[in-house]
Image (spheres, rainbow, N blue to C red):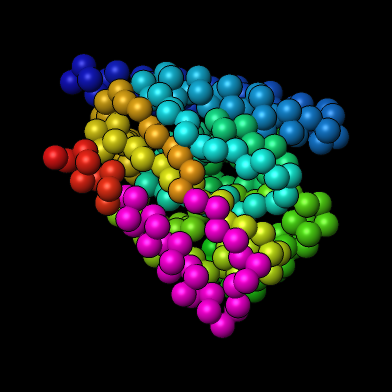
Amino acid sequence: MLKKVFNVFKVVIAFIFIILFGTIGSALRIASFGLLTNFNRSLLIPVFCKLTLGVMGIKVDNRVQQPKLAQPYFFTFNHNSYLDGFVLMSLGLKNLRIIMSEKMLVFLPVVLITFSIGLLYIPQKKNNRRRMNSFFNFEKRIKEERVSVMGSSEGVHQYGERIAPFNRGVYHMALNCEIPVFALFIYTPVESNPYANFRPFKRGTVVIETLGIIPTKDWKLENLDNHIDDVRKLYVKRFNEYYNMNTI
């Protein structure tokens, strides 16, 4: 009973942090007419994310090899936990637009944080026409502004101990923009993963690492599904390696 109460307390404190830093970051972006958006991405929000994860007893082992070339990338990742957003934003990547489903717009605290860093929302699959228009606008922005974009390959799905099927849209976008896929892998220990019901979870360390950088300049539209499958196989292989290593 005491552990459950303590777990609820940690989650409440985390939500207070989200509202506080989201409000501060949004105010800075508005007051600066957007000039402090990169400051929010690279400094303010990463500090907030590390503090929030720390309150929940989660450490981040950051093994990501930052790209040396100043070119746009499509950063993607496996999405097995609600903690993933905090872990990814703690990296402090500049000149980056994160893509998130409009499904998250119902959570005001999350909206404050995402607004402060200039996050882009994408309609769900049931709104096909608006979704296609959104991808067209994302592609235009990437080409004109030379910015990177980050999105989940799995999209909206039920979190679990598996790699869900990959969406085609984000890879079609990477192909059209001729930007490399920067694959990030996140490992969250089962006992430290709150999943969807914020069940009691233990202190632990989340690992985030570079899985690989995959060029897309030689990709062809007619073979796109095969390329996506090849990328997914990398994630499945690494996921199984971590799972087997931690269940022996």
Look at the magenta stretch and give its main secondary structure: helix
Question: Which residue occupies 33% across, 41% down?
Answer: 195
Counting from the top left corner in percent of width and height, residue 210 is at: 49, 44
Q: Which residues are magenta?
A: 212-239
Report whether residue 117 is seen: no
Nearest the viewer among 225 and 196 is: 225
Pick out the residue farthest to the bottom: 222
When the figure is inspected, residue 93 is found, relative to residue 119, above or below; the finding is above
Question: Which residue occupies 35% across, 27% down?
Answer: 205
Q: Quadrant of the C terminus?
A: top left
Q: Does residue 50 appear to the left or right of 9 in the view shown?
A: right
Question: Which residue occupies 84% across, 29% down?
Answer: 32
Q: Does residue 61 appear to the left or right of 194 in the view shown?
A: right
When the figure is inspected, residue 19 is found, relative to residue 118, above or below; the finding is above
Counting from the top left corner in percent of width and height, residue 128 is at: 59, 73
Nearest the viewer among 126 and 25 is: 25
Report whether residue 124 is seen: yes
Residue 179, quarter of picture = bottom right
Q: Is residue 109 magenta?
A: no
Q: Quadrant of the N terminus?
A: top left
When the figure is inspected, residue 164 is found, relative to residue 38, above or below; the finding is below
